[in-house]
Image (cartoon, grey):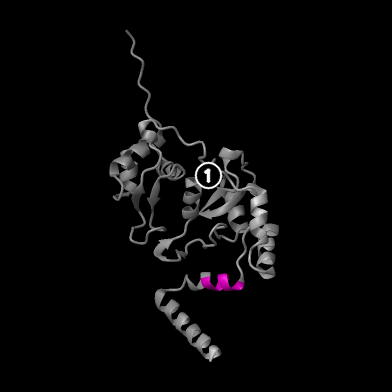
Amino acid sequence: MTQTPQLRPSSGIRVAEFIANVGEGNKFSKIELFDAVPGVSQADRRMRDLREMGWVIDNYKMNPTLKPDEYLLKKIGTRIHEGQPRPKSVRRSVTGPKRRRILERDGHTCQVCGVRAGMDYPGEPGRKAVLTIGHIIPNSRGGSDDESNLRAECTRCGDQARDITMDPPSAASIFTRAQHVGGLKEKKRLYGWMAAGHRTLDDTEAVFNDWARLPRAQRLEVMNQLGQQVITEME
């Protein structure tokens, strides 16, 4: 009697199984990842795919306590290695040239929170922003992969967006809120963002973002100098 050969799990499932076995809160190296899934030349890419399914995996760019070849599993998302279906909202891949165009168009800045690539998050020193490409209208709600529906997002805002389960706001509710945004100056600023199709930083925000990229000692020096000037002008 001929036995039906058992199908080997896909590379993505094998990567998910290895990382899940590492356990939340534990580290693993790139070498350990590749050793665990021999024959998979793009194991690190399969790992990045898991982030689109709710897995939170830090690298040294996000967590400066990690070495360049280390990763930290903070949260297990969809357990595809246990048969859980992949979420329908998983983003389709964006090609390299398109990704670069969108990042350059958006000034390498998250269009949700305004953080620049490589900057520390305000209030979270040591956690650096890494940008990805997100959908304004998610694929699950009929959104396309056209560049007009894509924007630069940091991974934190992207993770938060995927956690939102409520219905999207209506045009009427957004217009009502826009009418009550500050004074004329703030309305003009908001209109400018809408006309440009993305959020632009004003001079104050741009200076702060560049200041945040300085070494700590230099940040304190500049902050104290500005503080003295503010005090002098108030007197």
Q: For the N terminus, which image quadrant?
A: top left
Q: Residue at x 68, y 70 (%)?
A: 185
How far across and how far down the image is residue 40, in percent?
39, 37
Between 10 and 172, the one lying in front of the other is 172
How far across and how far down the image is residue 202, in percent?
61, 70
- 5 relative to 100 in the view: left or right: left
Between 132 and 95, the one lying in front of the other is 132
Q: Is residue 194 magenta?
A: no
Between 97 and 27, the one lying in front of the other is 27
Magenta region: which residues? 203-208
**How would you rate the neighbour count of disc 1 (Cα within 10 Å): few for under 14, some for 14-19, many for 20 or more?**
few
Q: Is residue 87 above or below residue 222?
A: above
Q: Residue at x 32, y 47 (%)?
A: 31
Query: Number of numbered discs present?
Result: 1
| SS for dot 1 | loop
**What secondary structure characterizes most of the magenta part?**
helix
Q: Quadrant of residue 189?
A: bottom right
Q: Residue at x 55, y 60 (%)?
A: 109
- 20 relative to 94 in the view: left or right: left
How far across and how far down the image is residue 214, in percent?
46, 73
How far across and how far down the image is residue 130, in percent?
47, 56
Between 194 and 144, the one lying in front of the other is 194
Residue with the most extreme top position: 1
Q: Is residue 67 above or below residue 78?
A: below
Q: Amino acid at mark 1?
A: Met
Residue that badge 1 annotates: 166
Q: Residue at x 54, y 42 (%)?
A: 93
Q: Is residue 77 above or below residue 176?
A: above
Q: Is residue 80 above or below residue 26?
A: above
